[in-house]
Image (cartoon, rainbow, N blue to C red):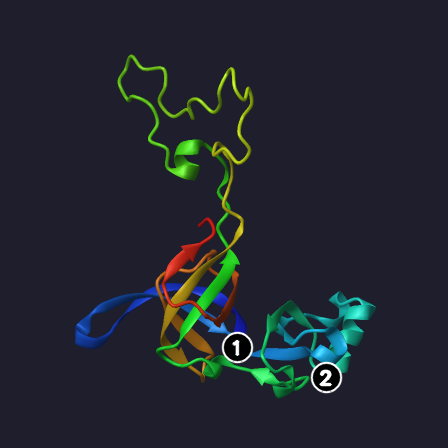
Amino acid sequence: MKGLLGKKLGMTQIFGEGDRLIPVTVIEAGPCVVTQVKTDATDGYEAVQIGYGEKREKHVNQPTAGHFKKSGAEPKRYLTELRVDNATDYKLGQELKADIFAEGDRADALGVSKGKGFTGGMKRWGFSGGPAGHGSHFHRRTGSIGMAATPSRVIKGKRGPGQHGNKQCAVINLDIVKVDPDQNIIMVRGAVPGARGSIILLKETKKGVRKVAGKL
Protein backbone atom coordinates (compact mmCIF):
# COMPACT_ATOMS: atom_id res chain seq x y z
CA MET A 1 0.00 0.00 0.00
CA LYS A 2 1.43 3.36 -1.00
CA GLY A 3 0.93 6.45 1.12
CA LEU A 4 2.28 9.89 2.00
CA LEU A 5 2.12 12.33 4.87
CA GLY A 6 1.33 15.88 3.88
CA LYS A 7 -0.16 19.22 4.82
CA LYS A 8 -3.63 20.46 3.97
CA LEU A 9 -3.25 23.78 2.16
CA GLY A 10 -6.96 24.51 1.68
CA MET A 11 -9.77 24.09 -0.84
CA THR A 12 -10.29 25.49 -4.31
CA GLN A 13 -12.03 24.49 -7.52
CA ILE A 14 -10.88 23.46 -10.96
CA PHE A 15 -12.59 22.78 -14.25
CA GLY A 16 -12.83 19.21 -15.50
CA GLU A 17 -14.09 17.69 -18.72
CA GLY A 18 -16.92 19.63 -20.32
CA ASP A 19 -16.11 22.66 -18.13
CA ARG A 20 -17.54 20.84 -15.12
CA LEU A 21 -16.63 22.58 -11.85
CA ILE A 22 -14.87 20.25 -9.37
CA PRO A 23 -14.29 21.21 -5.71
CA VAL A 24 -10.87 19.96 -4.62
CA THR A 25 -8.66 19.93 -1.53
CA VAL A 26 -5.04 20.89 -2.14
CA ILE A 27 -2.55 18.75 -0.20
CA GLU A 28 1.21 19.28 -0.08
CA ALA A 29 2.08 15.56 -0.06
CA GLY A 30 5.68 14.87 0.93
CA PRO A 31 8.46 14.60 0.28
CA CYS A 32 8.60 11.80 2.84
CA VAL A 33 11.59 9.69 3.82
CA VAL A 34 11.63 5.98 4.71
CA THR A 35 12.96 5.88 8.28
CA GLN A 36 12.39 2.19 9.06
CA VAL A 37 11.72 -1.03 7.15
CA LYS A 38 9.94 -3.88 8.95
CA THR A 39 9.88 -7.41 7.54
CA ASP A 40 8.41 -10.75 8.54
CA ALA A 41 11.86 -11.97 9.53
CA THR A 42 12.64 -9.10 11.92
CA ASP A 43 9.24 -7.85 13.13
CA GLY A 44 6.67 -10.46 12.13
CA TYR A 45 4.92 -8.29 9.55
CA GLU A 46 5.66 -6.17 6.48
CA ALA A 47 5.59 -2.40 6.92
CA VAL A 48 7.54 0.80 6.36
CA GLN A 49 7.81 3.87 8.57
CA ILE A 50 7.89 7.23 6.81
CA GLY A 51 8.74 10.67 8.16
CA TYR A 52 7.58 14.14 7.11
CA GLY A 53 8.39 17.70 8.16
CA GLU A 54 11.68 19.12 9.32
CA LYS A 55 12.66 19.14 12.99
CA ARG A 56 15.69 20.84 14.56
CA GLU A 57 18.26 18.47 15.99
CA LYS A 58 18.28 20.16 19.40
CA HIS A 59 14.61 19.23 19.81
CA VAL A 60 15.26 15.51 19.21
CA ASN A 61 16.11 13.25 22.18
CA GLN A 62 19.00 10.80 22.00
CA PRO A 63 17.09 7.56 21.22
CA THR A 64 15.11 9.26 18.44
CA ALA A 65 18.28 10.84 17.04
CA GLY A 66 19.85 7.37 16.86
CA HIS A 67 16.78 6.08 15.05
CA PHE A 68 17.10 8.75 12.36
CA LYS A 69 20.86 8.33 12.13
CA LYS A 70 20.40 4.64 11.35
CA SER A 71 18.17 5.51 8.40
CA GLY A 72 20.50 8.24 7.21
CA ALA A 73 17.68 10.80 7.23
CA GLU A 74 17.39 14.19 8.86
CA PRO A 75 15.10 14.31 11.95
CA LYS A 76 11.44 14.44 10.99
CA ARG A 77 8.58 15.95 12.95
CA TYR A 78 5.86 13.44 11.97
CA LEU A 79 6.16 9.66 11.64
CA THR A 80 3.66 7.06 10.55
CA GLU A 81 3.69 3.40 9.58
CA LEU A 82 2.18 1.84 6.47
CA ARG A 83 1.54 -1.84 5.88
CA VAL A 84 2.96 -3.00 2.56
CA ASP A 85 3.02 -6.27 0.64
CA ASN A 86 6.80 -6.42 0.32
CA ALA A 87 8.86 -4.15 2.58
CA THR A 88 12.11 -5.12 0.84
CA ASP A 89 11.04 -2.95 -2.10
CA TYR A 90 11.87 0.06 0.09
CA LYS A 91 15.28 1.24 1.27
CA LEU A 92 16.26 3.26 4.34
CA GLY A 93 16.54 6.93 3.45
CA GLN A 94 14.48 6.50 0.26
CA GLU A 95 12.53 9.64 -0.64
CA LEU A 96 8.85 9.32 -1.56
CA LYS A 97 7.23 12.13 -3.52
CA ALA A 98 3.80 12.98 -4.87
CA ASP A 99 4.51 11.15 -8.13
CA ILE A 100 3.79 7.79 -6.45
CA PHE A 101 0.15 8.75 -7.09
CA ALA A 102 -1.35 9.48 -10.49
CA GLU A 103 -4.45 11.22 -11.74
CA GLY A 104 -7.41 8.86 -11.61
CA ASP A 105 -6.16 6.94 -8.56
CA ARG A 106 -8.33 6.56 -5.47
CA ALA A 107 -7.04 7.43 -2.00
CA ASP A 108 -8.12 7.65 1.65
CA ALA A 109 -7.45 10.87 3.57
CA LEU A 110 -6.96 10.58 7.35
CA GLY A 111 -6.71 13.56 9.66
CA VAL A 112 -7.99 15.20 12.85
CA SER A 113 -11.27 17.08 12.45
CA LYS A 114 -11.68 20.67 13.60
CA GLY A 115 -12.34 20.95 17.33
CA LYS A 116 -15.53 22.85 18.21
CA GLY A 117 -15.38 22.46 21.99
CA PHE A 118 -18.33 21.44 24.16
CA THR A 119 -21.55 21.71 22.14
CA GLY A 120 -25.18 20.76 22.63
CA GLY A 121 -27.10 17.95 20.98
CA MET A 122 -28.49 20.10 18.18
CA LYS A 123 -25.09 21.22 16.89
CA ARG A 124 -23.27 17.99 17.69
CA TRP A 125 -25.79 15.48 16.35
CA GLY A 126 -28.31 17.53 14.38
CA PHE A 127 -31.23 17.09 16.80
CA SER A 128 -34.34 19.03 15.77
CA GLY A 129 -34.95 20.63 19.20
CA GLY A 130 -38.28 21.64 20.68
CA PRO A 131 -41.03 24.07 19.62
CA ALA A 132 -39.83 27.53 18.64
CA GLY A 133 -42.93 29.38 19.92
CA HIS A 134 -42.78 32.04 22.63
CA GLY A 135 -44.66 29.90 25.13
CA SER A 136 -42.25 26.98 24.81
CA HIS A 137 -39.67 26.28 27.50
CA PHE A 138 -37.98 23.60 25.40
CA HIS A 139 -35.99 25.10 22.52
CA ARG A 140 -32.58 23.45 22.25
CA ARG A 141 -32.51 20.84 25.00
CA THR A 142 -31.81 17.16 24.38
CA GLY A 143 -35.05 15.72 25.74
CA SER A 144 -35.59 12.32 27.34
CA ILE A 145 -32.45 10.16 27.51
CA GLY A 146 -33.63 7.08 29.39
CA MET A 147 -36.46 5.08 31.00
CA ALA A 148 -37.58 5.59 34.60
CA ALA A 149 -38.53 2.00 35.42
CA THR A 150 -36.59 -0.35 33.16
CA PRO A 151 -33.61 -0.34 32.80
CA SER A 152 -33.47 2.72 35.10
CA ARG A 153 -30.29 4.02 33.53
CA VAL A 154 -28.98 5.85 30.49
CA ILE A 155 -27.99 3.41 27.75
CA LYS A 156 -24.26 3.40 27.01
CA GLY A 157 -23.38 5.40 23.91
CA LYS A 158 -26.48 7.62 24.09
CA ARG A 159 -26.01 10.70 21.94
CA GLY A 160 -26.01 13.97 23.84
CA PRO A 161 -24.02 17.14 24.55
CA GLY A 162 -20.24 16.83 24.75
CA GLN A 163 -16.91 17.33 22.98
CA HIS A 164 -17.48 18.04 19.31
CA GLY A 165 -14.75 17.42 16.74
CA ASN A 166 -11.01 17.10 17.42
CA LYS A 167 -11.19 13.39 16.58
CA GLN A 168 -9.20 11.34 14.13
CA CYS A 169 -11.40 10.44 11.20
CA ALA A 170 -11.15 9.57 7.54
CA VAL A 171 -12.78 10.24 4.21
CA ILE A 172 -12.21 7.22 2.02
CA ASN A 173 -12.20 6.44 -1.68
CA LEU A 174 -11.51 9.97 -2.93
CA ASP A 175 -10.65 10.71 -6.57
CA ILE A 176 -7.19 12.14 -7.19
CA VAL A 177 -7.94 14.86 -9.72
CA LYS A 178 -4.50 16.35 -10.29
CA VAL A 179 -0.86 15.65 -9.35
CA ASP A 180 1.95 18.21 -9.59
CA PRO A 181 5.22 16.32 -8.88
CA ASP A 182 7.38 19.46 -9.16
CA GLN A 183 5.65 21.13 -6.20
CA ASN A 184 4.54 17.91 -4.45
CA ILE A 185 0.91 18.96 -4.78
CA ILE A 186 -2.00 16.50 -4.92
CA MET A 187 -5.58 17.62 -5.46
CA VAL A 188 -8.37 15.32 -4.31
CA ARG A 189 -12.06 15.72 -5.06
CA GLY A 190 -14.11 16.99 -2.12
CA ALA A 191 -13.22 17.83 1.47
CA VAL A 192 -10.85 16.11 3.89
CA PRO A 193 -10.74 16.38 7.71
CA GLY A 194 -8.87 19.13 9.49
CA ALA A 195 -8.08 22.82 9.30
CA ARG A 196 -5.63 24.50 6.95
CA GLY A 197 -2.09 23.53 7.84
CA SER A 198 -3.10 20.27 9.55
CA ILE A 199 -1.35 16.99 8.82
CA ILE A 200 -3.04 14.55 6.44
CA LEU A 201 -2.19 10.93 5.73
CA LEU A 202 -3.03 10.13 2.13
CA LYS A 203 -2.92 6.42 1.33
CA GLU A 204 -4.06 4.12 -1.42
CA THR A 205 -7.62 2.93 -0.95
CA LYS A 206 -8.84 -0.64 -1.25
CA LYS A 207 -12.55 0.22 -1.19
CA GLY A 208 -14.82 0.16 -4.19
CA VAL A 209 -17.60 2.45 -2.92
CA ARG A 210 -17.21 6.03 -1.75
CA LYS A 211 -18.40 6.62 1.81
CA VAL A 212 -17.46 8.65 4.88
CA ALA A 213 -16.00 7.03 8.00
CA GLY A 214 -15.83 8.64 11.42
CA LYS A 215 -17.33 11.90 12.70
CA LEU A 216 -16.53 15.07 10.82
* Mark sitting earlier along the chain (1/2): 1
Q: Residue 17 location in percent, x, y?
A: 21, 76
* Label disc, if present, on residue 126 of the rendered structure: none
Identify the image quadrant of residue 174: bottom left
- Residue 105 in the image: above or below residue 157: below
What residue is shown at x 45% (from left), y 70% (from top)? 206
Q: Is residue 57 left or right of residue 81?
A: right
Q: Residue 63 location in percent, x, y?
A: 81, 69
Residue situated in front as seen by the camera: 167 or 147: 147
Q: Residue 155 location in percent, x, y?
A: 53, 30
What amino acid is found at the position of numbered circle 1 in the picture?
Answer: Lys
Q: Residue furthest top?
A: 135
Q: Residues within 10 Å of mark 2 (few under 14, many from 20)?
A: some
Q: Which residue is mark 1?
A: 2
- Residue 17 in the image: above or below residue 8: below
Q: Residue 143 location in percent, x, y?
A: 42, 23
- Residue 147 in the image: above or below residue 158: above
Q: Which residue is mark 2?
A: 72
